[in-house]
Amino acid sequence: MRIDVITIFPEYLEPLNVSLVGKARARGQLDVRIHNLRDWTHDRHNTVDDSPFGGGPGMVMKPEPWGEALDAVTASGADAADTAEAVDGAEAVDAADVSERRPVLVVPTPSGLPFTQELAVELSEQPWLIFTPARYEGIDRRVIDEYADRYDVREVSIGDYVLAGGEAPVLVIVEAVARLLPGVLGNAESHRDDSFAPGAMADLLEGPVYTKPPVWREREVPEVLLSGHHGKVARFRRDEAFRRTTANRPDLIERCDPAALDKADRALLAELGWEELPDGRFGRAAPAVEE
Ligand code: ADE
């Protein structure tokens, strides 16, 4: 996969050199290119912002540098010469794939669609992502409209809070996407039980995990995990997942597909004070009304 990031703070993206993403880059599985937006300005002060039409606080990012930057970066898709080469037999970034397919433009903004595991999976299946993290009050809208005519543009929010810019969201999104690429995580099974992963534990948060030693500061690892009984371990983990999900994300339980709930799940939810509704879903039992 190829990833381009256009930013006024290239140094903010340095974490992409370390850990999982850094290793995927070193192995040639990920071709990450960071660009300085100011390289596409032409005035003495390398200006990228201006005051908003219609008034109001803050500054807006000017369309011209973004337009030039996006034209240059999208046009560089055909340039296969500096595409990373695979080492150690790892799956290489496929230069032909990149040049033949259009990039997906990912625009981090608090006004975007929520970033979910589902979107991470979808983005991980693309050959090429271009990120446009903004500062100030955002980018002149015409830039988004201009490229939405030609490319798949995704405006994405990483949560209901406002950051000072889109660079931290880029780090978040790239890490969530990169770990899903084939061969990037050491153990391909590792994402099977992830919270929010589609599959057996769908719609449940992952429960607690333990490692050696079996006793630490007089705290014991739950005995069932040492039993070697796979069925009991699976049941324990599922129960813990339900406990955590009911406590931290009751909305996920309310949305849970009733067909995904077995008898033991239903019994546990009832024990935790949840009520089975006529359609088989579960809802929080109404608090008792005082007389
Ligand atoms: N830029 C500022 N806040 C953001 C958020 N919550 N998500 C994505 N981009 C942002």
Image (spheres, helix red, strand yellow):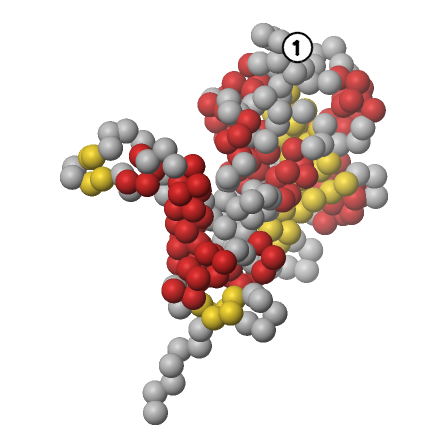
Q: Position of residue 54 (x, y in %)?
A: 68, 60
Picture layout, residue 288 above or below residue 128: below
Picture layout, residue 254 above or below residue 241: below
Q: Nearer the viewer, residue 44 or 115?
A: 115
Q: Position of residue 18 (x, y in %)?
A: 47, 22
Q: Which residue lies furthest to the left in this view?
A: 218
The residue at 54%/36% (across/down) is 192
Picture layout, residue 19 above or below residue 228: above
The residue at 56%/20% (across/down) is 24
Q: Which of 41 and 159 is in front in this view?
A: 159
Tag 1, which secondary structure?
A: loop
Q: Is residue 209 left or right of residue 120?
A: left
Looking at the figure, which quarter contains the C terminus? bottom left
In this figure, which residue is indicated by the disc labeled 1? 85
Q: Is residue 66 left or right of residue 267?
A: right
Specify the amino acid type for callout 1.
Glu
